[in-house]
Structures are given as C-alpha cells and as structure tokens.
Image (tube, rainbow, N blue to C red):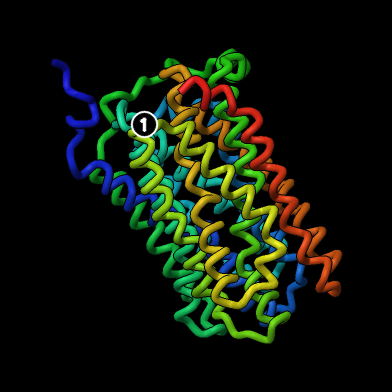
Amino acid sequence: MKHPVSSTVPSHVLPLIVLSQFAGTSVWFAGNAILPALQIQYQLPDSMLGNITTAVQSGFIIGTLVFALLSIADRFSPVQLFMCCALLAAVFNVMVIWAGNDIISLLTCRLLTGFFLAGVYPVGMKIAADWYAKGLGKALGFLVGALVAGKALPHLIKSTIQVDNWQQVMILTSIIAASGGLLIGLFLKNGSHRAKSAGLQKVNLVSLFKDKSFKASSFGYFGHMWELYSFWAFVPLMITWYNHFHASSIPVSFWSFVIIGVGCISCMIGGSISNRIGSAKVAWVSLIVSGICCLLSPLFFLASPGIFLICLMLWGCFVIADSPQFSALVSQTAPPVTKGTALTLVTSIGFAITIVSIETLNLIWNRFMSDDVAKYWLLPVLAIGPVFGLFHMKSLVQKN
C-alpha cells in the first residue's frame, strides 16, 4: 500500500516553514502599529490609517501581479525567492525610520515593503503545497496561523515600548523578518512535489477561471478578503473609539495584538478539522460566523468592555479561519505547473479588493468622525464580502 505523501515529509519541514512565515510577515502591520506615534511626532492627518495600510496592500498587489505575469514562483526556486524577498522587505521596513517626517517617502517605503512581501506570503504557501500533497488544508492552517501571528506581532512589540521609541519597533520587526528569510533559504529545500514551469504561459492566466471549482474557490476567497484586512486595519481604531465613547482605558496596542493574533489559533484548529470534513465546509462555516459578526457589530459598541473584547476576539477568530482553506482549495483546483502562479494571481486580486474595502471604510469612518451614533452602522458594510463568498462557493460545499 502506498503511504500518504505527507507521512514522508521530514518532521522539521512544517515548523521551519511556519516559523519563517511568522518572521517574514512581521513587517506587514509595523507601520500601523507605530502610526499613532508618527502622528504625534510629525502631525500626520487622521486619514493616514487607511493610506498607510493601502500603501502596503498596493505594493503587495503590484508585486503579486509581477510575480504572476512572469511566473516567477514556478520558474525559480521558491525557497531562494522567499529568502531574497524577506530580506528586501526588511530593508524597506526599517527605512521608515528615515522617512517618517515625509508622507511621500513614508508611503513609498511601505509600498516597497508590500511589494517584496509578495515573495513571502504566497510563495510560503507555494512551498507548503510543494511538500504536502495530502493534508494541505492542515499545513496551510498552521502556515496562515503563523502569518496572522506575524502581522499581530508589531502591536505586541509596540505595547511594550514607549511612544517616542517607535523606531525600535521598525528595527526589531526588520531583524525578525530578515531572520525568517535566512532560516528558510539556508535550511530548507524545495518540496518533492514541485512542478517547474517551462516558462511564461499566458494562456494559463486566462483559462484558470474557466474551471468551475477553481472559480468557486477564488470567488469565495475574494469575498473573504473584502472583510479581512479592513477588520484588521481598523481594530486599533475601534478600540480607541470605544475608549473615547465609554471613557474606558482598554490598552489599544496589547488588545489589538490579542484580537488579531487569536486568529492564529483558529487557523490551526480549522486546518486540523479540514482533514476530516474538508476545506470547503470549514471555509463555509467561518464565512457564516464572521458575516454574522459584521452584521451584529453595532451592538458590540454598546456592550461592557469585557463583552466588547470577547466579541472582537470571536470575530478575530472566524475572520481568518477560512483563509488557509481557500488557499488550499485554490491550490488543489489549479493545474500543477501553474500552482504558484495561480496562488499568486488569486492573492493579488484578493488584495486589490482589500484596498477598495479599506478605503471605503476609511472614507465613511472619517466622514462621520464627529457623529458618535453613526459609527454603530459602519462595520456592517463588511458583510458584503461574506455574503458574496457564500453565494459563490455553494457548489464546492455541495460537492464535498
């Protein structure tokens, strides 16, 4: 009897990928974590929250499009690509220290950080997919869990550092990201299931979405992305506003870390469950619960601080638990020789959607900045994503 491929994978592979992904993505929200300090020091406008997040997302989109169009993740060694991009992301992240007093320079550094993160996040998934032909949902559950923890890390670092020492956040996150790149580049080989592309095949990018299963997986992911990054980006602002409205003193940086970081656990649990019931069903349930959180979110702000935080942590769990399962579904439904390109392309489109979502919420939030009552009804706009995703992935759930 032929053993499952995943049983032949060396035990150190998944921990190494997970640790490297955690470290490599630690620079993603570093700009968001230090933004309050930058606004105090350089008198930056309130709209910078959306702008600094959008800059990273835009850079990531440009990077993923370049990588997809040139089939870079399929034509070159994924582990070496991961290492190089993690090192370059770390460089541009730390350069914010010298660019903080100029908005254009600041946003450019964040854009370039996002560009090179395109060689970390989707390429990390590609590396995992090359190793795990079976149990991919579980493997990606741990991998995206590491991504979540990495994105939450700057908030934890910021909570332990004084406001005027924001430079330390950028230095520490850059060191961590560079270490992750070196770790995977020096100590891991490409997976045994890697199918190297012969070169750029334009037809693949056009024909991918003709497959109904691939299209359903991708559209479900797109709906998920409408909600995810807007929620993450606005968590600190939601806590800040709650403190203002209720005259409470919830530590913003620490609880932002907890609310975002708790998704790490749900990704891992969802990944394990997917081995029994399938990735499509895990993603379906996660979308339903996070969609309900979107719709009920105005009530969260009327609750006591403890209930408010519990509700946001619940939302933080389910807003991300479906992400690795969508990645697994996209990977499993894409042609093997274009797996890396497919993951990168779908990720790119998904992140383009996050910009529309973030800027929409940012516009509404700032439009009603002086109207406390109206804020109760801003976040349900995010429910558009889960509803869209659930509608398009019905066939996948029925099939599985």
Q: How many numbered markers are drawn? A: 1
Give the residue drawn at x 57%, y 42%: 287
Depth order, front residue of 117/396:
396
Q: At which x and y percent is residue 346? A: 57, 32
- The correct choice, above or below, for 386 with respect to 112 in the image is above
Depth order, front residue of 317/181:
317
Depth order, front residue of 271/253:
271
How many other residues sit within 10 Å of disc 1, few (<14), some (14-19) or many (≥20)?
Answer: many
Q: Quadrant of the C terminus?
A: top left
Q: Residue furthest left?
A: 1
Q: At which x and y percent is residue 263? A: 46, 55
Judge whether residue 87 can be spotted in this image: no
Give the residue drawn at x 52%, y 59%: 314
Which of the 4 image quadrants contains residue 225? top right
- The correct choice, above or below, for 176 with respect to 142 in the image is below
Q: Which residue is mark 1?
A: 129
Judge whether residue 318 can be spotted in this image: yes
Going by the numbered disc 1, the residue's amino acid type is Ala
Q: Quadrant of the N terminus?
A: top left
Q: Secondary structure at mark 1?
A: helix
Q: At which x and y percent is residue 47? A: 76, 65
Q: At which x and y percent is residue 121? A: 46, 44
Which of the 4 image quadrants contains residue 197? top left
Give the residue drawn at x 29%, y 51%: 183
